[in-house]
Image: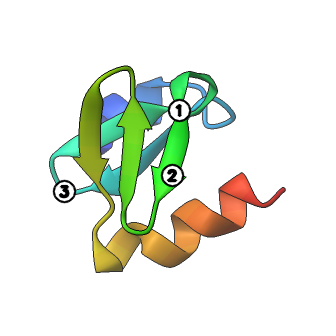
Amino acid sequence: MKLILSKLPASKFIRVHRSFIVSIPHINSIQRNRIKIGDKLIPISESYNSDFFQVIEK
């Protein structure tokens, strides 16, 4: 996953879970510790939570 993330533009992609990298422009909504993209819910793990919200709040 680290290799994949390193090849993606950091301004458009972020890791939110050990199994998930998401496209920031495609996020429809954020519900507590989950992201909704289309009809899919993706968990935000505790270890990536603070980094994710720092990026989103910019």
- Give the CA separation, mark 1 to mark 2: 8 Å
Snapshot quadrant of residue 5: top left
Q: Residues within 10 Å of mark 1 (few under 14, many from 20)?
A: few
Confirm or deny contact between disc 1 and disc 2 (CB under 8 A): yes
Q: Nearer the viewer, residue 34 or 20?
A: 34
Asked if residue 13 is positioned above or below residue 57 in the image, the reply reads: above
Residue type beneath disc 2: Ile
State which quarter of the image contains the C terminus.
Answer: bottom right
Q: Is residue 1 visible?
A: no
Horizontal side of 14 relative to 34 (left or right) equals right
Q: Is label 3 in a helix, a strand or a loop?
A: loop
Residue that badge 3 annotates: 18
Q: Residue at x 15, y 47 (%)?
A: 19
State which quarter of the image contains the N terminus.
Answer: top left
Asked if residue 9 is positioned above or below residue 11 in the image, the reply reads: above
Snapshot quadrant of residue 11: top right
Q: Is residue 7 visible?
A: yes
Residue type beneath disc 3: Arg
Residue that badge 2 annotates: 30
- Give the CA separation, mark 1 to mark 3: 18 Å
Q: Which mark is residue 27?
A: 1
Q: Position of residue 46 (x, y in %)?
A: 32, 79
Q: Residue at x 61, y 37 (%)?
A: 10
Mark whose residue sits in front, 1 or 3: 1
Residue type beneath disc 1: Ile
**Looking at the image, what colour scheme do you see?**
rainbow
Q: Nearer the viewer, residue 2 or 29?
A: 29
Q: Is label 1 in a helix, a strand or a loop?
A: loop
Q: Residue at x 33, y 61 (%)?
A: 44
